[in-house]
Amino acid sequence: MRILITEMEIDGKKIKLETGKMAKQADGAVVVSCEGTSVLVTAVVSDDVRPIDFLPLTVDVEEKLYAAGKIPGSFFKREGRPTETATLTCRLIDRTIRPNFDKRFRNETQVVLTVLSADLENPPDMLGMIGVAAALEISNIPFQGPVAGVRVGRVDDRWVIDPTYEQIKLSSLNMVVAGNKEAILMVEAGAMEIPESQIVEALSVGHEAIKKIIGKIEELDVEVRRQSGEKPKSELIDGITAGLEEKYGRVASNLIESYKSGDEAAIDKGREAFEKVAAEAAVEFDDSYRKVVLVLTRAVGERVLSDMLEIEIVPEVRDEMKQAIRKASDPELSKYQASLIRKDARKSLAVPFSERFPGQERRIKEIMQGVERKLLRELILDEELRPDGRKPFQIRKLTCEVGLLSKTHGSALFTRGQTQVLSIATLGAYGEKQILDDLGTEDYKSFLHHYNFPPFSSGEARPMRGPKRREIGHGALVERALLPLIPDAEEFPYTIRLVSEVLESNGSTSMASLCASSMALMDAGVPLKNKSSVGGIAMGLILEGDRSAILSDIQGLEDAIGDMDFKVAGTSAGVTALQMDIKCLGLSPRIMEAALEQARQGRSFIVKAMTEAISEPRREVSPNAPSMVQIKIPVKKIGEVIGPGGKNIRGMIERYEVDIDVEDDGRVFVFGRNRENVEKARRDIELITKDPEVGERFKGKVVKIMNFGAFVQLVPGKDGLIHISKLSKGRVDRVEDVVNVGDIVEVEIEAIDNMGRINLRAIDLNPDVN
């Protein structure tokens, strides 16, 4: 295959897609480049079907530091575990492409993005998103594409597609939008309290750019298949699928009839015939299509046989299942009690069919779950009856508490229905900020939010390991929602760490974490901009044809059976963060607008409840938090504060038990547990940087004795000389008769010569010496 290149221009920047040069053994491989940033994307699917009930899709982002001319800072000088940025990019892409695979697809599928070059101007994540879409499209992996994604920013009242790092810093919106030609599939955004109307406009702008990118991906796919002589992907897969459906249809129909007859020999023969279809189908096609046939056979076979079993089972169980669902919708029941009612119904109703169709227990179980899902959705659409008895717009009971923990700097407990989160705020020294070692332009960050989801929160017992991708993603969402209100370092130079501990889980723990974290910050005395609470709500959707129901404050079951999980965070002034995941093939602008408006109303209700618990940040930081002073010194004096080899600053840190951070612009931050020591350190820094004047008095330490006098340290880095004649009013024969090294003496500056040397005289030191 020769090298193929497609180019496009998006908002003034040229993007190039290239295939046929690198990674040719992958099912699909594309290199996407924009100026100095290049990303290699590969997509591979396994021939083997895994015996599981979910799509085994993995997205990995490899941030190679060589891309930016860096050597990793670790001991082994190799890239380690994925950075937070890489993990978040994985989630963005996974959430975009997962809904576009057949729900019965069980082949291991891996997408790998390798950043080959990074110019530190154009972020690689959106190039990777385009590359994933292109790699899947030019492959024969059964993926319902193409899709694409862009970042939308707003700088100087102008929409910007795929802004640079510098533009992102200036933008009031940082939104990633993904979709197909018809609709939007995924949204992730951080915003500076902007109105919902601007969100809708940004979605429209992003979708137009997505359509343009998809057009170029389709051009590349056409050229790849023209060169290889393959049929168009949709035609190829549709043709193979139709042939497999016909073959499986015959044998599945015979198998069902064998079950009905009860003839065990016929049943065994029918099962063998069903299993043979895959092997027979593979040899009927050209070798170049062998892999796609192997990939499709199991998914098609599962669908055909399951559909036939559904025809036999569903009419007999529908009414009894509906009764169980109504019983479980009692709002007084706990999540566990309601779940148990539905689970017992599924199990008891499945028993006679497991006897009637032996060997099909797994498929029967899936059918029962499908019946339950369909009935739950019907009740919401037909009767506005949710699984816990609420109406679509209703929010569960809320309680908010602050100041629960006596020794922490700030704490809050937020409970919404059977979801409960405890958030703790900790204030640290400016120098405790997190150092970043990735391909971004930021070297550190001083505001952190960590989200923990222990197994007991959902009534489970399993090993507790480090944070998984979901926990990192939820933590970042809350961090992004709060960031617009975090004060600047000039105003509040603390490092702020929030930790959200999920204590109970039944839907929307990330938004509960946001609410608890907002209150914990206020309890800690962090002066949030506008003194505003940040609230969040998770919206759901049931979509059947042209009928839809938007649900406020979804619980776990509604997330599982619904078509959308749309998290909206913000203040009373506007939106600060969004995250949308969907399971259907896109949403219309009308539904997006309606969901945003319903979310605004729900968010206002939640913020009001939070405000009743704590209406504004406390006037002072917690007494448990470190004391802090900020000093501005001349840049030319920085060296004097630090001292030779860091002697002066280390001395103050050890002497006063404080943390001292000196910035290049002359800002100095002093943090310590003891307020008095912090003030002493500040005094020393001010004295070091202040030019001494004749007549000033100091208490200093004798640091050196000479035969002509004693040297006294006035402040770290500044010594003066008391000549022997100035040690006392009387005659002094030996310096040691009056002072020794380590003595603290009071002195006055008598003179400063043109070389800056300081001459001192002792104040009331041994006046009786003769």
Image (cartoon, rainbow, N blue to C red):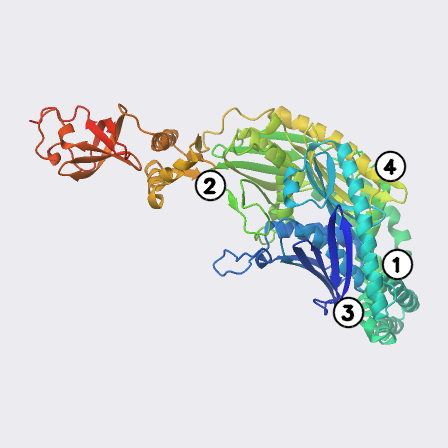
Q: In this view, does 23 lie to the left or right of 758?
A: right
x, y percentage for residue 557? 75, 44
Of mark 1 and mark 2, the one earlier in the sequence is 1
Tell me the distance, in whole angstroms, between the alpha carbons under discs 2 and 4.
57 Å
User: Looking at the image, which is closer to me, 277 or 228?
Assistant: 228
Distance Cα–Cα, label 1 vs label 2:
62 Å
Sequence order check, earlier mark of 2 and 3 = 3
Give the residue pinned by disc 2.
431
Viewer-side label of 1, 2? 2
Which image quadrant: the C terminus? top left
| Amino acid type, callout 1 | Asp
Label ID, residue 307: 1
Q: Is residue 624 left or right of residue 708?
A: right
Considering depth in this image, is 546 or 188 the residue closer to the camera? Answer: 188
Q: Is residue 521 left or right of residue 204?
A: left
**SS class, disc 1:** helix
First of labels 3, 1 by sequence position:
3
Q: Where in the figure is residue 375, as x and y percent of width and height?
A: 85, 45
Q: Is residue 42 above or below residue 1?
A: above
In terms of secondary structure, where does tag 2 sit? helix
Determine the CA span between mark 3 and mark 4.
59 Å
Badge 3: residue crowd in 10 Å (few <14, some 14–19, many ≥20):
few
Which kind of residue does numbered mark 2 sit on?
Answer: Gly
Dot 3 or dot 4: first in sequence order is 3
